[in-house]
Image (cartoon, rainbow, N blue to C red):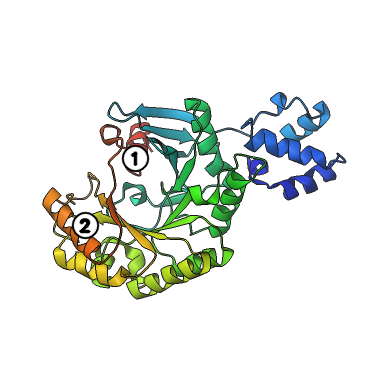
Amino acid sequence: MNEIVSLNIEELERLILSYGESKFRAKQLFEWFHKKMIWDYQEMSNLPIKLREKLAVDYPIMPLRIVEKLESKLDGTIKYLFELWDSHIIESVFMRYKHGNSVCISSQVGCRMGCKFCASTLEGRVRNLMPAEMVGQIYAIQKDTNERVSNIVVMGSGEPLEELDITLKFVHLINAPQGQNIGSRHITVSTCGLVPEMKRLADEKLQINLALSLHATTDEKRKAVMPIAYKYSIEELINACKYFINQTNRRITFEYALIEGENDSEEDARRMGQLLKGMLCHVNLIPVNKIEERNYKSSGASSVEKFIRILEQYGIPTTLRRTLGADIDAACGQLRRRYIKKRGE
């Protein structure tokens, strides 16, 4: 189901030729899927009726269905729960900024990385999403809001680099001039730190942004909150980041969730300053989200201010992420878990 929407123009050309149709039909089909965001063959008026009928039988499509939608009264952020063709649930967030609208999408149903401060990982990974299901989140949101999305962050449920080929296919589809044509520099992909995949992504030399979830300044502390730290050390991570910067000349963003009493001391800030000094990077400090199953607390304002001040002394640009959708559980995985519990799964 929906595999055809994951195909690029060259792959669609091969498919169309196998039906004995003219090659140019592939471009028409691609534009219906990705420019006009129409996933119903019956509406594809410039395609022959017989071709549409064959495609409907051989390659059925089911758009993502909105099953729940919460809009923040504070800032207009919208949290979406989508049902996929096989009844699995994923979530996405639509955020309005002065510089344009951003969408945070999921790359997997659930996640198996086990980060302790994230609700997405509590039930593990169910399956990977197809590229069609990744672009489908953006299309469904644009159609629902009737607003253009200009920035994409692949930072919802899932580890986008775990199945790197799928994520790369998604980037090429959303970036295609015949489709939404969203520039690479407006796409950010996050990772908890899969070192070989980070290097492979660097070798692609794409102009996308990479965000690394760091969340600790020593291997011991990182292991306490991120199981992936047992596989790759901070030294290996930093080397992979430097490799990415050298290959792409793109700045890395280090995501750092501030947890009171765990990773928010002045010593932690100084260690981070020493780790990142001189790198083409930016630190995004995040107030940790409250999750029922964990007892982490977000750092107090004075700790946050000290942390920022110390990093700036090392010449590292640092921002505190603005909390959006605080009244609608806009943090990763929370709404989906509540919905699944309610549904009795």
Instruction: Note whether 151 is above or below 160 in the view shown.
Output: above
Which x, y percent locates residue 52? 77, 30
What amino acid does circle 2 point to? Ile
Instruction: Note whether 88 is above or below 237 in the view shown.
Output: above
Could you say whether the residue bearing mark 1 is in a helix, strand or loop?
helix
Q: Residue furthest right?
A: 20
In the shown orientation, is residue 261 left or right of residue 322? left
Q: Residue at x 60, y 52 (%)?
A: 169
In the shown orientation, is residue 337 left or right of residue 199? left
Mark 2 neighbour density, 10 Å: few (under 14) some (14–19) many (20 or more): many
Q: Which quadrant would residue 205 be assigned to in this image?
A: bottom right
| Res. 337 mark | 1
Q: Quadrant of the C terminus?
A: top left
What amino acid does circle 1 point to? Arg
Mark 1 neighbour density, 10 Å: few (under 14) some (14–19) many (20 or more): some
Which x, y percent locates residue 239? 41, 74
> Are discs 1 and 2 less than 8 Å apart at CB?
no
| Res. 87 mark | none
Which x, y percent locates residue 133? 55, 42
What's the CA distance linking mark 1 and mark 2?
33 Å
Which x, y percent locates residue 45? 75, 24
Closer-to-camera residue (136/58): 136
Asked whether the viewer can see residue 86, the reply is: no
Closer-to-camera residue (173/307): 307
Q: Residue at x 44, y 28 (%)?
A: 67
Q: Residue at x 30, y 38 (%)?
A: 324
Give the residue at mark 2.
308
